[in-house]
Amino acid sequence: MTRQQKKLLRGLVIAAVVLLAVLIAVLLIKRNNAAKQAEEEAAQEAASSITEDHGYTSLTYSNGTATLSFSQDEEGSWIWSDDPEFPLDDTTVTSIVEAIQSLKPQQTITDGDTLDAYGLDQPSATLTATDAETGETLKLTFGKATTDGTSYYMLMNDAESPVYIVADTLYNYLSTPIYDMCVLPELPVLTENTINSLTIQGTVETTLTASRSEDTDTGDGDENEETTSSVTWTSGETNVTDNETLQSLLDELGGLYFTKCADYKPSDEAVELCGFTAPTAVLTASYVPDSGTEGTLTLTIGTKNVDGDSYYARMDDDTTIYLISASTVSTLVSVASAGLSA
């Protein structure tokens, strides 16, 4: 082979190598573009499927601790399917529906790792939402949190791909316990001007009675007449109006409220455990609210909860056990134990 032929052959080889490199680069670019397009299409498809205007009428979700189901009754109100009588505050349920309808992936993974890498082989939560009118059902499966802890890996409708990364908003709603969705009863506002009598039972029993009188000051003439009312408190035959413990008690009674539902329809064992077979204190208050109709409140205080910051409590004939902050009934408990201090 002559020198000229060798030179020509070398040029052809170089040209072939360059052409091959160009072809490989073109293929890689096309593949990368195809993957990006697939991710974009998957994201668009996911957003379309999730955010369509579905009127979801039932939800079921499992969060690793409990499985809860909710549905709409004939009037369109949300109920807890396990117990339709439960006083449900549907704020969380409606928030879940709204979160589903506005859910859009932050990122879509079409060619990623195995499902166990995202915690999707053993889901941390699942959600199924059904539109009764169309019969369509949406299922969302959540894996583990992302490294920053603000998002979760998610699958849709039992498909193993693509994997979506979504904000943790919806997942956090699914972590809400059922008792946190309970509508708490309002305790009446008991003030010195509305209370007729108080009976507090515990280790000792104390009865306090309010007597009201009006004093008229005529001043220099009838046109300057001024009427003032006063309340006198007695315990038995003793005037305790100026007793500091009584004044502290009245301050407490003006701001009583339950903080949480502890047990709805409790068992007999739970009732005993929470201290209601031998209550710490029982308050019976006779009062006349602004409406003018006399009412009676019976507030039963059981034992403290495990954290020690609240007491178990019951109201009137309601069998539900609630929590009431220990700091808001400290004087009531003290009077039940030792009566009014001097």
Image (cartoon, grey):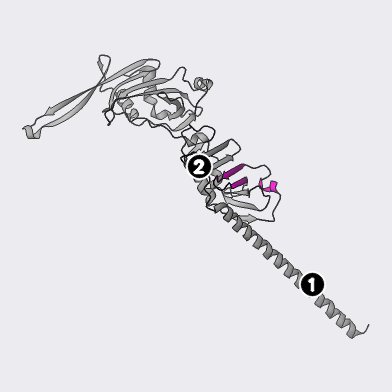
Q: Is 256 on the left-hand or right-hand side of 74?
A: left
Q: Of the residues shown, which amino acid type is indicated by label 1?
A: Leu
Q: Nearer the viewer, residue 77 or 161?
A: 77
Q: Position of residue 322 (x, y in %)?
A: 45, 28
User: Quadrant of residue 256 in the image?
Assistant: top left
The local crowd at label 2, few if under 14, some if 14 to 19, many if 20 or more residues have their Cα within 10 Å, is many
Q: Nearer the viewer, mark 2 or mark 1?
A: 2
The residue drawn where x is 58% and y is 40% is 61
Q: Is 202 on the left-hand or right-hand side of 85?
A: left
Tell me: residue 271, above or below residue 127: above
Residue position for label 1: 20
Q: Is 322 on the left-hand or right-hand side of 60?
A: left
State the extent of the magenta-drawn residues as a range: 114-142
Q: Position of residue 44 (x, y in %)?
A: 59, 58
Tell me: residue 119, above or below residue 86: below
Residue position for label 2: 93
Q: Can you say which quadrant of the picture contains the N terminus?
A: bottom right
Q: Nearer the viewer, residue 244 or 80?
A: 80
Q: Quick check: can you spot residue 146? A: no
Tell me: residue 279, above or below residue 76: above
User: Quadrant of residue 338 in the image?
Assistant: top left
